[in-house]
Image (spheres, rainbow, N blue to C red):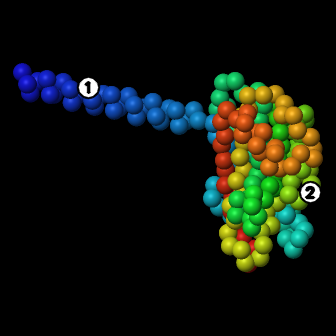
Amino acid sequence: MKKRMVLIIVLLLAVLLIVWGVLMMKSQDDAFQVTSTDIQPNAMLSPAQVYNAHGCSGQNISPELSWSNAPTGTKSFAIICHDPDAPREHGWYHWLVVNIPSHVSEIKTGGNIPGALSTVTDFKENAYGGACPPVGHGVHRYNFTVYALNTEKLDVSAQTAPTEVEKMVKQHALAQATLTGLYERK
């Protein structure tokens, strides 16, 4: 009787573990995610995504980004490209796009999104500014993060400081997904 009870408990635990594993795999498949045809995860950025000034000679073209599985309640999206390795207190903001309508799930290479707002970057431009770390500073990470927001519009202007834009984005974020590219100037 005792052996039978132990066997039943072991079988129940095994079934529970299998069900939990299936649910975890499903939740990962359903997670908010961002992909790109232009950026491979944790790989060097191509010259197309490198800045074309300040000693850098890239093409300065914003990458294609696609996102999927936005959470219920998403009313808009935001994109922020940030270099946390830049030798500044807040890193370096390369691209900020907010108020992206909730029906949009992609931005094409070099593209714009009607109705969205590009806010000022640390290059003092309202557009994508590619990778351009200091010479000899090592490999820098460029985090392309798409945020699903719980508001249709953020109360920001084209000249709102990048740190303030990011703060507002994070206050309204339901989910975020990041794709990281790398770049180094030797």
The disc at residue 124 is 2
The image shows residue 104, relative to residue 122, as above or below, that is above
Residue beneath disc 1: 12
Looking at this view, name the residue that lies furthest to the front. Answer: 89
Counting from the top left corner in percent of width and height, residue 4 is at 11, 24
Toward the left, the furthest residue is 1
- Identified at 65% across, 29% down, the residue is 71
Going by the numbered disc 1, the residue's amino acid type is: Leu
In screen coordinates, is 7 left or right of 15?
left
Q: Left or right: where does residue 123 sit relative to residue 93?
A: right
Instruction: Please identify the residue farthest to the top as the structure is shown.
Output: 1
Tell me whether circle 2 and circle 1 mark residues in contact (CB < 8 Å).
no
Q: Is residue 69 above or below residue 8?
A: below
Could you tell me which residue is drawn at 52 percent across and 32 percent down? 27
Q: Quadrant of the N terminus?
A: top left
- Residue 67, image quadrant: top right
Residue at 16% across / 28% down in the picture?
7
Q: Where is 108 relative to 85, above or below? A: above
Residue 80 horizontal side relative to residue 114, left or right:
left
Can you say whether 32 is above or below 62 in the image?
above
Q: Position of residue 145 (x, y in %)?
A: 71, 46
